[in-house]
Image (cartoon, rainbow, N blue to C red):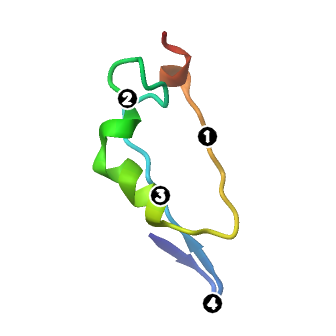
Amino acid sequence: MQHHGDTVLIERFAVSGRTMLKQAKPPLWNEIEFSDTLKYVPDVCVILLGTNDSNF
């Protein structure tokens, strides 16, 4: 968690080497960080997909 000024809070829920594809190995869906993202309610959400997300 990073604080920027009085009003901005940045959270990061990344897990290295994981993919968003449920059928691929290893999926992010099985990680505790993913369940943490479902509990977080941001005003703005940015999702950055990487090369692991192109795996089939």
Among the 4 quarters of the image, the one containing residue 18: top left
Name the residue tied to disc 2. Answer: 27
The crowd level at tag 4 (other Cα within 10 Å; few <14, some 14-19, many 20+) is few
- Disc 3 marks a residue whose amino acid type is Leu
User: Gap in Å between the C-alphas at discs 2 and 4?
Assistant: 35 Å
In the rendered image of this protein, does residue 40 appear above or below residue 33?
Answer: below
Name the residue tied to disc 3. Answer: 38
User: Gap in Å between the C-alphas at discs 1 and 2?
Assistant: 15 Å
CB within 8 Å, label 1 to label 2: no
Near-viewer residue (42 or 14):
42
- Disc 1 marks a residue whose amino acid type is Leu
**Which residue occupies 50% across, 66% down?**
40
In the rendered image of this protein, does residue 6 appear above or below residue 39?
Answer: below
Q: Residue furthest bottom?
A: 6
In the rendered image of this protein, does residue 31 appear above or below residue 27?
Answer: below
CB within 8 Å, label 2 to label 4: no
- Left or right of 48 in this view: 36: left
- Disc 4 marks a residue whose amino acid type is Asp
SS at circle 3: helix
Name the residue tied to disc 1. Answer: 48
SS at circle 2: loop
Give the mark, 1 or 4, whose residue is nearer the N terminus. Answer: 4
User: Gap in Å between the C-alphas at discs 1 and 4?
Assistant: 25 Å
**Which residue occupies 39% across, 36% down?**
28
SS at circle 1: loop
Name the residue tied to disc 4. Answer: 6
Give the mark, 3 or 1, whose residue is nearer the N terminus. Answer: 3
User: Gap in Å between the C-alphas at discs 2 and 3?
Assistant: 16 Å
**Which residue occupies 48% across, 25% down?**
21
* 1 vs 4, front mark: 1
CB within 8 Å, label 2 to label 3: no
